[in-house]
Amino acid sequence: MFRPTLLSRQIGRPLIGLGKQRVAFAKPLILSQRTSVRYNSTQSLEQATQAASDAASKFDTSLVFDQAAAVVDKVSEVASVAPDQIGYLRSLGLVDGFWPNDIVQQALELTHYLGIPWWGSIIITTIAFRTLFFPLFASASDNMAKSQEIMPKTRSIQREISKARASGNQTLMQRKTFELRRLNKKHGIKQSRTLLSPVTQITYSLGSFFGIREMCNLPVEGFKNGGALWFYDLTATDPYLGLQILSACVYSLSMHLGGDTAMNQFSGRTKKFFVALPFLSVIFTYQLSAGVLVYFAANGFFSVFQGRLLRSPEFRKWYGLHPLPDPATVKANGSAFDNIAKTWKELKEDSANGKVDADQKARQATELALAKAKSGRVVIDKKMRR
């Protein structure tokens, strides 16, 4: 008689076949439970793998970082004001003070709020600011035209001042300085007018450049499709170099016509260099975004228009500006840059001559002291006796 062993009793029960005894093992309860446990562990492993994959997708562990996508996500999270509302740029953290770039950005936002696309807002804002600064350039042009007429007298007095300074004659230097001031006052010349316009222009240009570049780099909502013609994306560079070449052409023409004040401040090789300089700058501007280049082009076109306007005798008479000097007078007196270079050269020469005179006086004083020591008596100078 078949007796099931201890293992068969624990695992299964015997089955009796036809004519002989055969042991078969049925699926016991404990094995089915283990099978279900194995199925649960497999499902848990799959869930853990999926959770780890989801967690890993939240972190970029690759070497490539999509900066544009990250910035766009950050902008969408930070912005709390709709893009078509006033205060949108402030919500992005752009307009946070009263620096030149903040003022330009605020003006761009106000212009865009009127329904004008971003490329048009850049052009209109540039024209508005340049129109606001026009009186400063007109005053500088008037001042420079007056200075050109009395340039020979001015240079003569300045030469005497430099000689007096080099020789240490303070009385003569003060007298000649007062004479120069009286000459400028007589002709209505104020040097502050000449210096104010370039300082204002540089400040505004830097503010516009950095302000628009910040908006392109963020980018502000609408800049990616706020362009026109071939520069549809204001945040991208111009692959055809159209805006770069256009900006170079208008700036070169402006320098050829005399700049923003219509006065030929350079001549000869110096003028040729500054006329060619905008084309050389394409090497550095080809990587700039289209939004910045739109500002460059608009600013250059206004400079050409302003220069042509200030060169018009009819406009100068209507606006109350001093007439421009004759080309022959300008050529004889030299340009502003040439006069500065000549004055600097004369100053160096006078300083060197003054140093020679000082050394000569020191040598004479030393010789006089030695003569006193050798003779053992007091040597009275003729000048002191007088």
Image (cartoon, rainbow, N blue to C red):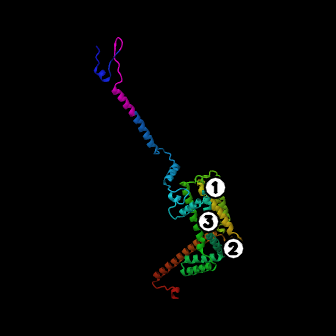
**Residue ranking furthest to the bottom:** 386
Q: Quadrant of residue 244?
A: bottom right
Residue in the foreground of this view, choosing between 177 and 372? 177
- State whether residue 176 is above or below residue 37: below
Q: CA distance from mark 3 to mark 2?
A: 20 Å
Q: Give the amino acid type for the residue marked by disc 1 in the picture.
A: Leu
Give the percent coordinates (x, y) of residue 48. Answer: 41, 38
Asked which secondary structure carries label 3, the reply is: helix
Earlier sequence position, callout 3 versus callout 2: 3
Asked which secondary structure carries label 2, the reply is: helix
Which residue is the site of mark 3? 130
Earlier sequence position, callout 2 versus callout 1: 1
- Magenta-highlighted residues: 17-41
The residue mark sitting in front, 3 or 1, is 3
- Residue 269 visible in the shown view: no
Q: Is residue 24 found inside the magenta-colored segment of the image?
A: yes
Which residue is the site of mark 1? 243
Asked which secondary structure carries label 1, the reply is: helix
The answer to whether residue 370 is left or right of residue 216 is left
Which residue is the site of mark 2? 318
Q: Give the amino acid type for the residue marked by disc 3 in the picture.
A: Arg
Give the class, few, some or many, for how many residues have Cα within 10 Å of label 2's Cα (few <14, many ≥20): few
Q: Give the amino acid type for the residue marked by disc 2 in the picture.
A: Trp
Find out whether the residues at labels 3 and 2 contact each other: C-beta distance under 8 Å.
no
What residue is shown at x 53% (from left), y 76% (from top)? 358
Find out whether the residues at labels 3 and 1 contact each other: C-beta distance under 8 Å.
no
Find out whether the residues at labels 2 and 1 contact each other: C-beta distance under 8 Å.
no
What residue is shown at x 58% (from left), y 77% (from top)? 161
Give the class, few, some or many, for how many residues have Cα within 10 Å of label 3's Cα (few <14, many ≥20): some
Residue in the foreground of this view, choosing between 327 and 105? 105
Earlier sequence position, callout 3 versus callout 1: 3
